[in-house]
Image (cartoon, rainbow, N blue to C red):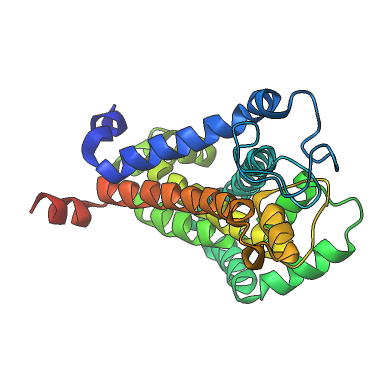
Amino acid sequence: MGLLSRWPGSIRLNVGIMLIGLIALTALLQPFLNQLIIGDEDPLLVGEFDLYLPPSQQHPLGTDRLGRDALALVLMGLRLSLMVGVLAGSSATAIGVTVGCIAGYKGGIFDNILRSTTDTILVIPSFPILIVLAAYVQGLGIPTMALLLAVFSWPQAARIIRSQVMSLKQRAYVEMARMSGLGDFAIIFKEIMPNLLPYIGVSFANSIMTTILAETGMRLLGLGPSRQATLGLVVSWAMGWGVLALGKWNLIFPAILCLVLIFVALNFVNMGLEETYNPRLRRVRRA
């Protein structure tokens, strides 16, 4: 009830949630939208239409160098990019929350080991390692790529959650829960976890942005499954064909715009959560 009572407090949060909801709905409806655009054909099928057709009623974004409908490819790319981001972000956030809760609540040797592991992964140059792994992992698909991205994306979430747990475990209601005989597991999930939800939301949004950005960078380098046309791969194809020099902006800007909208929406959610649940920002906003 406390969370819901503060729901309307931030315009940025509401706008971000509505925008990301619209993007997610478009991604979920991608198979039906593509059915309307190209029928039962595979969006990746080569030579289905004439090459480099300009935007028209039949092809709102025209066709690409291989005779594929550009709008169908962008919609597929949006769905797969969000899938990578959500899978990797969920995995990274789950790992980060688990590590952060254990390190922050238990302290001692648990905190030393987990904090050292987290700091070690933070200083490792993850992007070059991801490039090498993506180049040599056999059968690389969306789930495998998401897992690789998650492996290097959880430390930031772990640091945020750890610091909050260390603060929350000193509160009076946690002490009362200990005195009542609740175990550590129950205290973490019943007393501490509900107060971590805004921070988990911020960590999740950051993880999605980080992983989509990393996946796009890998695609621009020509890495990743060629049959999984994410937005990064759509942009990579367009750049490889030199569409800007040809004046074919319709083949590259829509995919870039989708990526920008995802990042803007998630940043609005982050800023909105900060404004809503950070007491200092709430005071500044009211002033």
User: In x, y percent, where is residue 47?
Assistant: 85, 42
- Residue 94 horizontal/vertical position (percent): 59, 46
Where the N terminus falls, by quadrant? top left
x then y, percent, for residue 131: 77, 68
**Residue that sits furthest to the right in the current view:** 138
> Residue 278: x percent and y percent?
26, 52
The residue at 69%/59% (across/down) is 238
Furthest-left residue in this view: 287
Quadrant of the rendering where the C terminus is positioned: bottom left
Give above or below for 30 relative to 247. Answer: above
* Camera sees residue 96: no
- Is residue 92 at all visible to an observer of this figure? yes
Side (left or right) of 212 relative to 49: left
Question: Is 261 left, or right, of 46 in this rendering?
Answer: left
**Which residue is drawn at the image coordinates 24% and 30% (left, top)?**
5
Identify the residue at horizontal 64%, vertical 52% (top origin): 251
Question: 56 or 75, which is in the foreground?
Answer: 56
Q: Is residue 121 left or right of residue 175?
A: right
Q: Please state the total of marks drawn on the protein image.
A: 0
**Taking 255 as reference, is 153 above or below it?**
below
- Residue at the image point whose x is 54% and y is 48% from the top: 258
Quadrant of the rendered image containing residue 132: bottom right
The answer to whether 37 is drawn above or below residue 67 in the figure is: above
Rendered image quadrant of residue 75: top right
Residue sitting nearer the eye, 53 or 145? 53
